[in-house]
């Protein structure tokens, strides 16, 4: 028998604090575990706050970016619209550029050229309008629209129009130039090409070699006219040729009307050929040699040149690129501005 079996169980020491007694009763391994858990919580809290601050800064940046972009676009468009208002007080030569292909949705489209021409003619400071041309031509429809409007504006405002040719003034570009009172060229300019064309390809021979069968159904015997995968019937070819001849005659009538007795007609003048500037003057397709500065200084007698040509500026390119998304984002950013703090 063990003498200690009759002893009562040990009682807590009343002198030691309860926390100390609990610490003594716990195992030594519990202390590092609690400390490690607290360190993880502190680290997690720090990273969470950093993420929140970073997210907030990024959100503020995005809002300010959209606002700045909206202000920039508005300023650029406003400044372009009022660009000529500050320069119309003094006499000047109004310039409108005709560059590149004449077609819809290009810098030489009828829509853009007409807008520029109206501003140039309506400006009380413009003494005359100069078309500086460097174009291989393009759509007869677009060229015809510009030519007709040019005639109307000349009669309405009683101002002269001069065409100045740089490297090229061919086909539809010359169609427009014919509406000018005088045409000036460089001796090496390319002028003319008074004609009309319609081009395409035919793949019927290639399809036969490859064993490809064309399956085409139409309602209307001429609906598939000039289809590249079908043979061209003589009747349809004659119809297309007659249409081209008619448009060609319209072109010829415009040149005769614009150039009048100055034009020295030859059998080749309306054949689609083109000539250099020196030959063009001899044929009456142009009036004299000269560039923009010469015409403004010596002909118009207004040496200052103001450019009315519409430009596809950075703001417009941004607006086209971002489209509705940009506008929506900008409006949303403006609405959220009061929430910034």
Image (cartoon, helix red, strand yellow):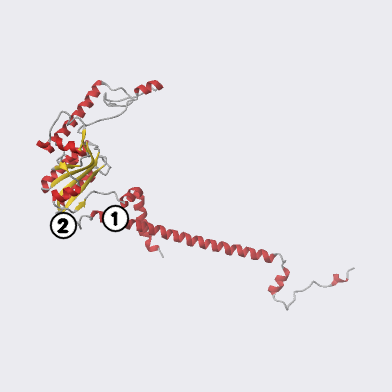
Mark toward the viewer: 2 or 1: 2
Q: Which residue position holds label 2?
A: 90
At x 20%, y 40%, the residue is 187
- From the top left corner, tell me how far across and down residue 105 is, in percent: 28, 42
Position in image of residue 65 (x %, y %): 38, 57
Q: Can see residue 88?
A: yes
Q: According to the image, label 1 marks what residue?
A: 76
In the depicted structure, whether residue 81 falls above or below residue 176:
below
- Residue lying at the far left in this picture: please name it: 261
Question: Residue 269's x, y, as percent?
Answer: 17, 31
Q: Residue at x 78, y 73 (%)?
A: 10
Distance in Å between CA atoms under marks 2 and 1: 24 Å
The image quarter in which residue 337 lies: bottom left
Relative to 194, does residue 37 appear above or below in the rendering?
Answer: below
Q: Is residue 92 left or right of residue 80?
A: left
Mark 1 packing: few (<14 Cα in 10 Å), some, or many (20+)?
A: some
């Amino acid at each position: 028998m063990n003498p200690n079996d009759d002893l009562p169980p040990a009682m807590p020491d009343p002198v030691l604090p309860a926390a100390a007694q609990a610490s003594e009763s716990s195992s030594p391994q519990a202390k590092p575990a609690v400390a490690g858990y607290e360190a993880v919580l502190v680290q997690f809290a720090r990273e969470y706050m950093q993420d929140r601050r970073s997210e907030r800064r990024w959100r503020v940046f995005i809002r300010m970016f959209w606002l700045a972009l909206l202000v920039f676009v508005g300023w650029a468009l406003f400044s372009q619209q009022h660009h000529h208002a500050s320069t119309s007080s003094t006499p000047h030569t109004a310039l409108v550029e005709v560059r590149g292909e004449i077609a819809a949705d290009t810098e030489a489209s009828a829509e853009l050229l007409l807008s520029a021409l109206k501003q140039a003619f309506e400006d009380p400071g413009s003494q005359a309008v100069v078309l500086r041309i460097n174009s291989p031509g393009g759509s007869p429809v677009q060229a015809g629209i510009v030519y007709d409007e040019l005639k109307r504006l000349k009669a309405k405002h009683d101002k002269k129009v001069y065409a100045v040719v740089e490297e090229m003034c061919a086909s539809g570009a010359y169609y427009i130039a014919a509406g000018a009172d005088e045409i000036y060229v460089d001796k090496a300019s390319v002028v003319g090409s008074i004609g009309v064309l319609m081009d395409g390809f035919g793949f019927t021979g290639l399809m036969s070699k490859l064993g490809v069968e064309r399956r085409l159904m139409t309602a209307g015997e001429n609906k598939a006219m000039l289809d590249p995968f079908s043979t061209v019937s003589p009747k349809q070819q004659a119809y297309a040729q007659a249409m081209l001849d008619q448009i060609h005659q319209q072109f010829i009538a415009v040149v005769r009307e614009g150039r009048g007795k100055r034009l020295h007609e030859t059998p080749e003048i309306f054949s689609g050929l083109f000539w250099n500037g020196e030959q063009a003057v001899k044929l009456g397709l142009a009036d004299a040699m000269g560039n923009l500065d010469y015409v403004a200084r010596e002909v118009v007698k207004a040496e200052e040149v103001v450019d009315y040509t519409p430009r596809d500026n950075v703001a417009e390119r941004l607006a086209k690129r971002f489209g509705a998304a940009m506008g929506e984002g900008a409006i949303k950013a403006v609405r959220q501005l009061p929430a910034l703090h």
